[in-house]
């Protein structure tokens, strides 16, 4: 069964700290790995995405690290801010299939001022 | 604002009833995905339509059905509702490419009493 496992379930970080969320996948056909951010009462919004031909992608304070051999990828949020407090979902899809996203279970991040 | 609209925002109904959720994709987007978000199952793919045709099915119950109309809006029909169908239902749209960003709507919160 196609699965994406995400950890931790919840995370508390001090303002200015680094938040790290990890995901692992099983299906080696996955070739697109986005991270979504969801605020209460809102739909998920794309934060950053990576394809397996690179090991790292950085956009502002957000970085994805990708380890193809270990089938793992992670989101790093540098200089975490209270406004980053949200639920984060990793996901994966297989572009040879339909592009449907397989989501991790989500991580609730709280950044304390 | 993602440009994807969903109505209604909230829906409260009784077991055994039937409801219809509506989604209007971003202007120009041809593909619509439906996802269910519940506390125990997380975000799960239900079904995808592309330019009016069903492209993929996920863990969608037989009591659920969907369609995409010529104007590209989509409807998700849920019938013989059970308590366990209470969840957030999101649609997402893309221009059609399998690794295009999926833009999520604000969701419909369904409560079955």
Image: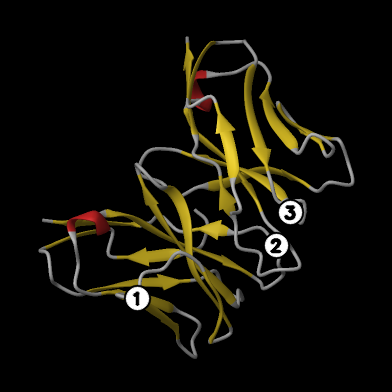
Give the image location of residue B50, x and y in percent: 59, 80
Residue A25 vertical placement versus B92 (above, below)? above
Colour scheme used in the picture?
secondary structure
Q: Residue furthest bottom?
A: B70
What is the chain identity of the residue bearing mark 3?
A
Direction from residue B48 to residue B66 in the image, left or right: left
Q: Nearer the viewer, mark 1 or mark 2?
A: 1
Residue at 34% x, 75% y is: B62
Quadrant for the N terminus of chain A in the image: bottom right
Looking at the rendered structure, which numbered label has been put on residue A19? none
Q: Residue at x 67, y 46 (%)?
A: A34
Q: Nearer the viewer, residue B107 or A105?
A: A105
Sooner in the amino-acid sequence: mark 1 or mark 2: 1
User: In this view of the protein, which residue sits in the foreground, A101 or B10?
Assistant: A101
Q: Quadrant of residue A96?
A: bottom right
The 10 Å Cα crowd at callout 1, few under 14, some 14 to 19, many 20 or more, is few
A106 left or right, relative to A72:
left
Give the structural element (helix, strand or loop) at label 3. loop
Mark 3 or 2, closer to the camera: 3
Secondary structure at badge 2 equals: loop
Separation (CA) of disc 1 from disc 3: 27 Å
On the image, the x and y values in percent for residue B30 come to 60, 78
Q: Are marks 3 and 2 in contact (CB under 8 Å)?
A: no
Residue tagged by mark 3? Answer: A30
**Residue B27 percent across, percent down from the top left:** 57, 73
Label 1 sits on residue: B62
From the viewer's perspective, is residue A12 above or below residue A34? above
Question: What is the chain identity of the residue bearing mark 2?
Answer: B
Q: Chain of mark 1?
A: B
Callouts 3 and 2 on one subunit: no
Crowding around mark 3 (Cα neighbors within 10 Å: few <14, some 14 to 19, many 20+) is many
């Amino acid at each position: 069964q196609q699965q994406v496992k995400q950890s931790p379930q919840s995370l508390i970080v001090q303002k200015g700290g680094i938040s790290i969320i990890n995901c692992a996948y099983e299906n080696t056909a996955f070739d697109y790995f986005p991270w979504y951010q969801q605020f209460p009462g809102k739909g998920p919004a794309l934060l950053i995405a990576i394809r397996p031909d690179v090991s790292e992608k950085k956009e502002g304070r957000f970085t994805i690290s990708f380890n193809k051999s270990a089938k793992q990828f992670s989101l790093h949020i540098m200089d975490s801010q209270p406004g980053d407090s949200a639920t984060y979902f990793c996901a994966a899809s297989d572009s040879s299939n339909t592009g449907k996203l397989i989501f991790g279970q989500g991580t609730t991040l709280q950044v304390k001022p | 604002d993602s440009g994807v609209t969903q109505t209604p925002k909230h829906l409260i109904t009784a077991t055994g009833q039937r409801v219809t959720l509506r989604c209007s994709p971003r202007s120009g987007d041809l593909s619509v995905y439906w996802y269910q978000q519940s506390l125990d199952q997380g975000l799960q793919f239900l079904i995808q339509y592309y330019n009016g045709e069903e492209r993929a099915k996920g863990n969608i119950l037989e009591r659920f059905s969907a369609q995409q109309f010529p104007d590209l809006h989509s409807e998700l029909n849920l019938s013989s509702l059970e308590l366990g169908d209470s969840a957030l239902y999101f649609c997402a749209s893309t221009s059609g490419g399998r690794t295009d960003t999926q833009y999520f709507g604000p969701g419909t919160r369904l409560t079955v009493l």
